[in-house]
Image (cartoon, grey):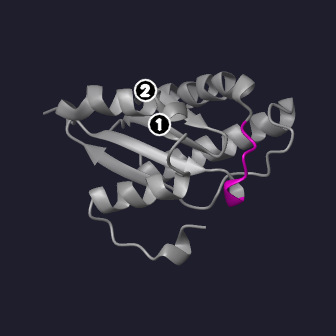
């Protein structure tokens, strides 16, 4: 028998110390590169977007890929890209850790729309406020001291 899965993830991670180092003009190049990493891991990319201090990825994980390895690969390879190309000159790296949340495939369109509208969404809500909302929505216990 073959392996069949339908696991829709929203992966969220920020820049180190939430510094606003991801300049708007170069983000599309970063997102294209991230999409390439995901495609090389045989993951289906639905949407990548973010703002100056964090990124959201909506993807289906290939069943052969471990989530933690995928996030590590994305962070390492994009850090290398950013440093080699000076894509974001003041970039100091990604934060430790990440948030990853699963969704029903029925929520796919709503989730894609949510990630697509990050710029508008963050006019009224900070990354920390958004992350706390996601953690609470998904019933994840957390200590606020770890949300640096």
Residue 4: image quadrant is: top left
- Is label 1 in contact with label 2 (beta carbons under 8 Å)? yes
Furthest-front residue in view?
Answer: 124
Q: Mark 1 points at which residue?
A: 57
- Regarding residue 3, the answer to whether it shows in the image is no
Please say if 65 is above or below 47: below
Crowd tier of the residue under label 1, counting other residues whose Cα lies within 10 Å: few below 14, some 14–19, many 20 or above: many
Total labels drawn? 2
* Camera-nearest residue between 3 and 112: 112
- Residue 25, percent from left and from top: 73, 23
Quarter in which the C terminus is drawn:
bottom right
Magenta stretch in the rendered image: 17-22
- 19 on left or right of 108: right
* Vertical comparison of 41 with 96: above or below: above
Identify the residue at horizontal 52%, vertical 27% (top origin).
Answer: 40
SS of the residue under disc 2: strand
- Considering every residue shown, the one lying at the far left of the view is 1
Q: For residue 45, which numbered disc appears in the image?
A: 2
User: Percent from the top left, x then y, of residue 117?
Assistant: 46, 29
Residue 82's x, y, as percent? 78, 36
The tag earlier along the polypeptide, 1 or 2, is 2
Side of 132 where 52 appears, left or right: right
Residue at 80 percent of width and 31 percent of height: 87
Residue 98 shows in this picture = yes
């Amino acid at each position: 028998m073959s392996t069949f899965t339908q696991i829709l993830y929203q992966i969220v991670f920020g820049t180190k110390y939430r510094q606003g180092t991801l300049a708007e003009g170069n983000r599309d190049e970063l997102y294209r590169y991230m999409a390439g990493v995901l495609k090389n891991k045989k993951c289906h990319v639905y949407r990548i977007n973010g703002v100056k201090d964090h990124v959201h990825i909506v993807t289906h994980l290939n069943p052969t890929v471990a989530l933690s390895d995928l996030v590590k690969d994305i962070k390492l390879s994009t850090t290398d890209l950013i440093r080699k190309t000076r894509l974001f000159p003041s970039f100091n790296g990604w934060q430790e850790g990440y948030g990853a949340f699963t969704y029903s495939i029925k929520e796919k369109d709503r989730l894609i729309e949510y990630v697509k509208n990050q710029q508008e969404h963050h006019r009224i809500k900070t990354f920390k406020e958004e992350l706390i909302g996601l953690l609470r929505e998904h019933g994840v216990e957390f200590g606020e001291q770890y949300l640096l």
